[in-house]
Image (cartoon, helix red, strand yellow):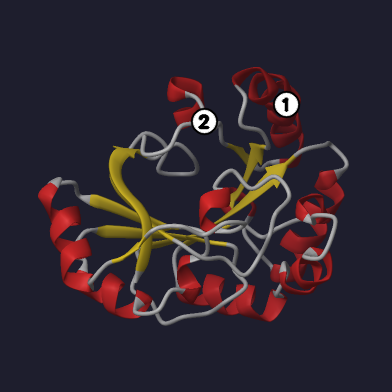
């Protein structure tokens, strides 16, 4: 399995915000979000081929009770099912929800990509065709404990969020809105108006705690 990085940090987003966790970041993605904050796993995938045993051993070495398998898109990674079955910790899978794999996980953190993610250029058509897969999303939320995490760049994005939530029949308290950005000032500005939207709509708000603490740095 191609792994971009493994590191021990705290969960910076979503319902498990602040929980110490080991992050296993797979390399490779079927989407090309224009604002992707991990281009080294999608636009220019990098990493090393690792055996499942070596990954599991490194994860266990930290002694943490939570593991986050992320990417890129971990659901397209070869041996992803075997990896999740070998890990004994609480597992969160972070996915765009475009692929269904029979992983073991305790929380599936799905981030459906909105129209604000579509890039210009040669990847635009592929990204737009793949970014929203309602049938796959319905299967995932019916099978796992889930959260739906949306990246919001503009208040106008909320109309698309409402449509998706209604189409999927998702529970509002499992919908999390997060400001788009990799700069503290941008996140603070967007977070201020997004928090007000969450109050009005009944959705949950999530900061990007790791960026607030350490900036947009790898391996933290």
Identify the residue at horizontal 36%, vertical 39% (top origin): 219
Q: Is residue 65 left or right of residue 191?
A: left
Residue 160, image quadrant: bottom right
Where disc 2 sits, the SS reads loop
- 114 vs 45, nearest the viewer: 45
Relative height, residue 123 to residue 190 (above, below): below
Check if mark 2's residue and mark 1's residue have beta carbons within 8 Å. no
Residue 153, image quadrant: top right
- 70 vs 197, nearest the viewer: 70
Where disc 1 sits, the SS reads helix
Query: Residue 36, how many percent across, how many down?
Result: 64, 48
Mark 2 vs mark 1, CA separation in Å: 17 Å
Q: Which residue is mark 1?
A: 190
Label at residue 101:
none
Kindly tell me whether residue 20 is visible in this rendering. no
Q: Quadrant of the C terminus?
A: top left
- Which of the two discs, 2 and 1, labels the residue nearer the N terminus? 1
Q: Which residue is mark 2?
A: 216
Identify the residue at horizontal 60%, vertical 63% (top origin): 96
Identify the residue at horizontal 65%, vertical 25% (top origin): 187
Query: Residue 46, how many percent across, how many down?
Result: 46, 57
Relative height, residue 146 to residue 22 (above, below): below
Q: Quadrant of the N terminus?
A: bottom left
Q: Is residue 97 left or right of residue 70?
A: right
- 184 vs 110, nearest the viewer: 184
Query: Residue 205, how many percent across, how many down?
Result: 60, 36
Q: Is residue 89 left or right of residue 69?
A: left
Q: Is residue 160 left or right of residue 106?
A: right
């Amino acid at each position: 399995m191609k792994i971009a990085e493994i590191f021990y940090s705290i969960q910076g987003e979503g319902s498990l915000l602040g929980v110490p966790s080991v992050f296993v970041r797979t390399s490779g993605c079927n989407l090309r979000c224009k604002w992707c904050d991990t281009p080294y796993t999608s636009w220019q995938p990098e990493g090393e081929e690792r055996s499942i045993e070596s990954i599991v051993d490194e994860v266990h070495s930290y002694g943490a009770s939570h593991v986050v398998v992320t990417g890129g898109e971990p659901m397209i990674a070869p041996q992803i099912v075997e990896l999740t079955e070998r890990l004994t910790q609480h597992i969160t899978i972070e996915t765009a929800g475009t692929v269904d794999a029979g992983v073991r996980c305790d929380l599936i953190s799905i981030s459906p990509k909105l129209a604000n993610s579509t890039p210009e250029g040669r990847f635009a058509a592929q990204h737009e065709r793949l970014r929203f897969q309602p049938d796959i999303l319905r299967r995932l939320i019916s099978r796992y404990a889930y959260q739906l995490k949306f990246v919001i760049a503009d208040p106008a994005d909320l109309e698309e969020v409402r449509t998706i939530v209604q189409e999927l029949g998702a529970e509002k308290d499992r919908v999390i809105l997060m400001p788009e950005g990799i700069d503290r000032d941008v996140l603070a500005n967007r977070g201020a108006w997004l928090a007000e939207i969450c109050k009005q709509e009944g959705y949950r708000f999530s900061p990007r705690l790791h960026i607030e603490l350490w900036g947009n740095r790898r391996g933290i």
